[in-house]
Image: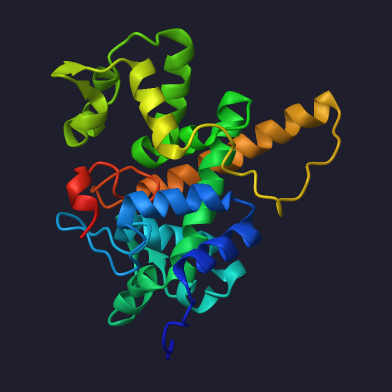
Amino acid sequence: MNIGPIPSAGGVEAAIRRASNVTGVDADFLVRTARRESAMNPAARARTSSAAGLFQFIEQTWLGTVKAHGAKHGYGQYADLIYRGGDGRWRVEGSARNIVLDLRFDPQAASTMAAELTASNAAYLRGRSGREPGAGDLYAAHFLGPAGAAQLMEAMERRPGASAAALFPQAAAANQSIFYRGGRPATVAEVHANLQRSAGNGAPASAAGSAPAAPDLSEHDRMLAARLDRLKQDQSLLALLMGQDGESRSGFGGAFAPEADKRV
């Protein structure tokens, strides 16, 4: 199949704002994430993992996200090439693999897939916690995966003084500046506050002006919708986790690499 060249997306920030418009994910949250991950460099590559592009997607997370969301954004020809192997990993045959992975270097494709993955994480956290996740919660999902972010949110309510490194040893080993303070383990509350500051305190990441307003629902309908939302997101999360390549459990894929390894 002849895929053809990757389309030009224009300016990086313009691409991010277009992704925000079509997904409802807050543009400022996406811009801040891209600045942290790649310094807004669409060609960025990590030195110690497969993470690449504006949002530093690792290969398996990228393939799973394009498979799930690509078709509705005009990337169906790429999504059709992706399949799950018998070992549960996402695969693309032959030279087409590089073509699909190189989409990570296109600002529009990377921004749109990052927004879709953020929206999926937000829906998971919403169903798990019963409240609208803020930007810090979504950044926690980037670092810890959506299930880990939910665990952090629950720990904040139940034991904020506990050691966060004990709860997330893998993440702590690779991100000591976040999980340790002067050589001592940071508390859950300290890590949560750090992530909130990094994400830009306050507004939910899904609060873009173009997002459709939620319809008025009865309490029964809201409960049913929440249950269906959580079931759908649990299924999506399981599919993504089964397709991970072992480099990370993060949203975009660079969470467990040291900060210096996320950028070039």
Left or right: where 215 falls relative to 205: right
Which percent across, then down, holds residue 46?
21, 58
In the image, what residue occupies the spot 68% across and 32% down? 226
Residue 89 appears in view:
no
Task: Answer whether residue 157 is visible to the viewer in this image.
Answer: yes
- Residue 201, image x and y in percent? 50, 32
Q: How many marks?
A: 0
147 lies above or below 158: below
The N terminus appears in which quarter of the rendering? bottom left
Quadrant location of the C terminus in the rendered image:
bottom left
Quadrant of the rendered image containing residue 184: top left
Q: Nearer the viewer, residue 52 or 234?
A: 52
Q: Is residue 253 above or below residue 165?
A: below
Residue shown at 18%/36% (left/top)? 174
Q: Quadrant of residue 142?
A: top left
Q: Nearer the viewer, residue 67 or 212?
A: 212
- Between residues 224 and 192, which one lies in front from this camera angle? 192
From the viewer's perspective, tell me whether residue 22 is left or right of residue 119.
right
- The colour scheme used to paint the residues is rainbow
Q: Residue 25 location, x and y as percent?
A: 59, 50
Residue in the image at 37% along x and 68% along y:
104
**In the image, residue 120 lies at what x, y percent?**
54, 46
Left or right of residue 235, residue 162 in this image = left
Residue 219: name its quadrant: top right
Q: Is residue 202 above or below residue 6?
A: above
In the shown orientation, is residue 214 left or right of residue 17?
right
Name the residue rendered at 65%, 43% in the picture: 207
